[in-house]
Image: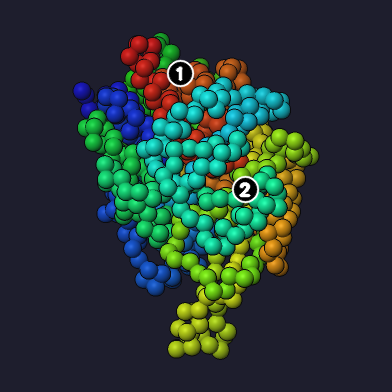
Amino acid sequence: MADNQYDAIVVGSGISGGWAAKELAEKGLKVLLLERGRNIEHVKDYVNATKESWEFPHRGGRTQQMIKDYPVLKRDYPLNETNLDYWCSDKDHPYSETKRFDWYRGYHVGGRSLMWGRQSYRWNKWDFEANAKEGIAIDWPIRYDDLASWYSYVERFAGIQGSKEGLEVLPDGEFLPAMDLNIVEKDLAAKIKAHYKGQRHMFIGRSANITEARPEQNRTNCQYRDRCWRGCPFGAYFSSQSATLPAAMKTGNLTLRPFSIVTKVLYDKDKKKASGVEIMDATDNKTYEFKSKIVFLCASAFNSTWILMNSANDIWPGGLGSASGELGHNVMDHHFRAGAGGTVEGFEDKYVYGRRPTGIYVPRFRNIYEDKRDYLRGFGYQGGASRGRGLPVAELTIGADLKEALSQPSEHWYFGMTGFGEMLPYHENKISLSKTLKDKWGLPSLDFDVEIKENEKKMRIDMMNDAKEILEAAGLKDVKANDNGYAPGMGIHEMGTARMGRDPKTSVLNGNNQVWDAPNVFVTDGACMTSASCVNPSLTYMALTARAADFAVNELKKQNL
């Protein structure tokens, strides 16, 4: 095989790209995995994984220089000292904002699979039906039953801990033994269930942290360190480095090429399909071409769409996949940072052991069954109970008195929760190639024109008030509702811009994640989403990717691609 010829090219090595590489390589294809950033090797390159806070010059916080250097990242919690190298440079990768959008990116092997929050939930059947029933945007071309077996497939490999609850609104999965609620959360969960007569639920957040060792994957069970986003030397949480890439490498069929910025999909007009991709080497700015039978775009939602847009030709001046007029449109995220918190009395003699890497989850209860609100869709809550160390008074902040104060827990337990709400797919929420702004490599940047609308604003009021009501019903004191403000992108759950659909006139992809205009090009990351649900989307990307890879290989065997 020539150095530039492969069966499949996968663009991006994050959650979706890692799964695509694994599935295609295990099915016997010679796969080239292209990543625009540097390589990060499992364990060896997790340089901060075992450091304590006092080993960082600024206890893991942020400096004034960091704030200056990272004007976007500083807008929320991602800017910190412990994993700064995992977030891409705002300076090297600028973008423009017609309306504010917080775009937090990880450009390296593994992508944001190294930094993600690991919350892993299945969509429910209503999530795939809602657009059609409500006349919003377009209908999904698939239903829950099309994805259920693939959810099971990826759950078994990735390793998801959680409890089976038997709820229609949040389907159960293939779970490892669940982590425990702490004593306060157990008490509150029982009180919530009793007060709402079993109509509202609180249980452990389902997360991609293994609670049983996986020796066949060389992964050890979670050590309750809660330092996941620095990289886990135990392989206890799912990432491309810990799980999918080792499996792909094991086949001998995978070639990984970091520092490879894919600039366009190469299109063969005669064959009406892609012939491969063009890349720019990030180290020397030289251009190379790689050929393949199929291409999987998994570069993250907006970068996959950027590649399609930048692949414009005389047939589609708006980019490959632009025939419908929907490429770049229908940007979605999850709006959050609205909820409530308060103090819990009566557990002053209790504490916690270890640092559990997940919290609680309260599934959606609005606009399901008989409940009807003056907005569409709904939200779930994440949060938890904690009892931090008591803060000493100013006069006691040195010496033995300080040590003594730090050794004591706070007087009361605190419980807080924040809602994650669904954002509707509005056509006018869009990204486009900038005509003026370019990145470090002279490539066009993106412009963002995205906002939340009345539907989301109405939902946020419920996210606050319902949280306050729930906590007061559970007996908490000094309960305060809060809305800490939200800008699109802050949820780091970007979706849309190359949606799936049933008709090439209204969508970019078909029901198998194929680009209508080039059926051997697949997009399986967040770009493909037709709506957003209100649960974390990564598990759905995994399932869609595994499903599309299976379809692609079968079509290759039939010589249909």
Above or below residue 125? Residue 230 is below
- Judging depth in this view, the residue of 200 and 81 nearest the camera is 200
Asked if residue 25 lies left or right of residue 57, the reply is left
Disc 1 crowd rating (10 Å Cα; few below 14, some 14-19, many 20+) is: many
Q: Secondary structure at mark 1?
A: strand
Question: Which percent across, then down, holds residue 160?
Answer: 43, 44
Q: Residue at x 33, y 39 (%)?
A: 244
Q: Residue at x 79, y 39 (%)?
A: 374
Check disc 1 and report the residue beneath it.
Answer: 518
Q: In the rendered image, which quarter contains the C terminus? A: top left
Q: Residue at x 41, y 44 (%)?
A: 176
Above or below residue 158? Residue 133 is above
Asked if residue 62 lies left or right of residue 416, the reply is left
Asked if residue 87 lies left or right of residue 379, the reply is left
Above or below residue 441? Residue 1 is above
Question: Which percent across, then down, holds residue 296?
Answer: 40, 28
- Judging depth in this view, the residue of 301 and 390 nearest the camera is 390
Q: Cα distance, mark 1 to mark 2?
A: 45 Å
Q: Residue at x 54, y 69 (%)?
A: 387
Asked if residue 324 lies left or right of residue 175, the reply is right
Question: Which percent across, then down, holds residue 139?
Answer: 63, 23
Mark 1 vs mark 2: which is more N-terminal?
2
> Which residue appears farthest toward the right when viewing the image?
374
Is any part of residue 248 visible from this angle?
A: yes
**What's under tag 1, amino acid-wise?**
Ala
Identify the mark at residue 201; answer none if there is no mark: 2
